[in-house]
Image (spheres, grey):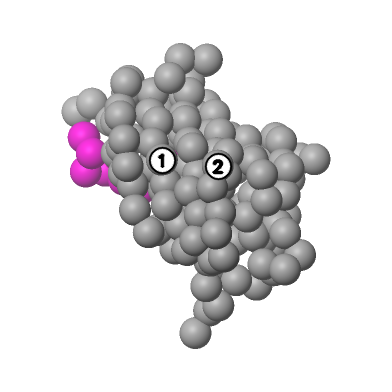
């Protein structure tokens, strides 16, 4: 199951400039998702990170991975219209730079879940090379 940007925005509440995934290439609702982010020089964060050598901030790579996991968990019918919030980030490692022109592949698999709390195992690659990985703890909640 693949999703375009419009379908992604029907599942998660993020919008520009904080929507950090362009497509979802694979989706197993409640289990895993694989997304893509086409990184361009037009990203607003490149104006200050860093003007002479643009590099995507690691925290935004983790956010993109979290959004990919949010698509997986919020695509379950019982979670429609809910929010997914960060509960924690563990074992985060950054292995390479992400620069304009890169296509970031984002893979998040839900590995634990108890009630509204869960953990996703996440990794980001460029051209098959690992650039970041982490375990992301999340909480599913109703919007206020």
Marks 1 and 2, the one that precedes in the sequence: 2
Taking the magenta stretch, the answer to whether it contains residue 45 is yes
Return the residue found at the far bottom: 144
Residue at 39%, 23% (x, y): give it: 131
Return the residue found at the far front: 114
Instruction: State the image coordinates of residue 112 (x, y, percent, origin top left).
Output: 54, 47
Q: Main secondary structure of the magenta part?
A: loop
Taking the magenta stretch, the answer to whether it contains residue 101 is no
Which quarter of the figure has residue 48?
A: top left
Q: Are marks 1 and 2 in contact (CB under 8 Å)?
A: yes
Label 1 vs label 2, nearer the camera: 2
Instruction: State the image coordinates of residue 81 (x, y, percent, origin top left).
Output: 65, 72
Q: Is residue 53 visible?
A: yes
Which quarter of the figure has residue 32?
A: top right
Instruction: State the image coordinates of residue 49 (x, y, percent, origin top left).
Output: 23, 39
Which quarter of the figure has residue 99?
A: top left
Residue at 30%, 29% (x, y): give it: 93
Q: CA distance from mark 1 to mark 2?
A: 9 Å
Q: Secondary structure at mark 1?
A: strand
Q: Secondary structure at mark 2?
A: strand
Which region shows up in magenta? 42-51
Task: Please tell me whether residue 19 is drawn above or below residue 123 in the rendered image.
Answer: below
Q: Is residue 98 visible?
A: no
Task: Please tell me whether residue 60 is drawn above or below residue 50 in the rendered image.
Answer: below
Q: Quadrant of the N terminus?
A: top right
Instruction: State the image coordinates of residue 64 (x, y, percent, origin top left).
Output: 46, 44
Residue at 31%, 35% (x, y): give it: 91
- Disc 2: which residue: 111
Residue at 23%, 26% (x, y): give it: 53
Residue 135: which numbered mark, if any?
1
Return the residue found at the far right: 1
């Amino acid at each position: 199951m693949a999703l375009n940007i419009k379908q992604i925005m029907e599942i998660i509440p993020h919008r520009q400039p904080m929507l950090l995934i362009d497509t979802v290439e694979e989706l197993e609702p409640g289990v895993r998702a694989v997304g893509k982010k086409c990184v361009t020089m037009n990203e607003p964060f490149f104006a200050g990170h860093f003007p002479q050598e643009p590099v995507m901030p690691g925290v935004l790579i983790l956010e993109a991975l979290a959004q990919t996991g949010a698509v997986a968990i919020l695509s379950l019918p019982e979670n429609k219209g809910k929010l997914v919030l960060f509960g924690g980030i563990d074992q985060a490692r950054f292995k390479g730079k992400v620069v304009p022109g890169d296509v970031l592949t984002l893979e998040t698999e839900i590995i634990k879940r108890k009630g509204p709390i869960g953990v996703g195992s996440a990794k980001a690659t460029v051209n098959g090379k690992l650039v970041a990985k982490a375990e992301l703890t999340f909480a599913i909640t109703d919007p206020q």
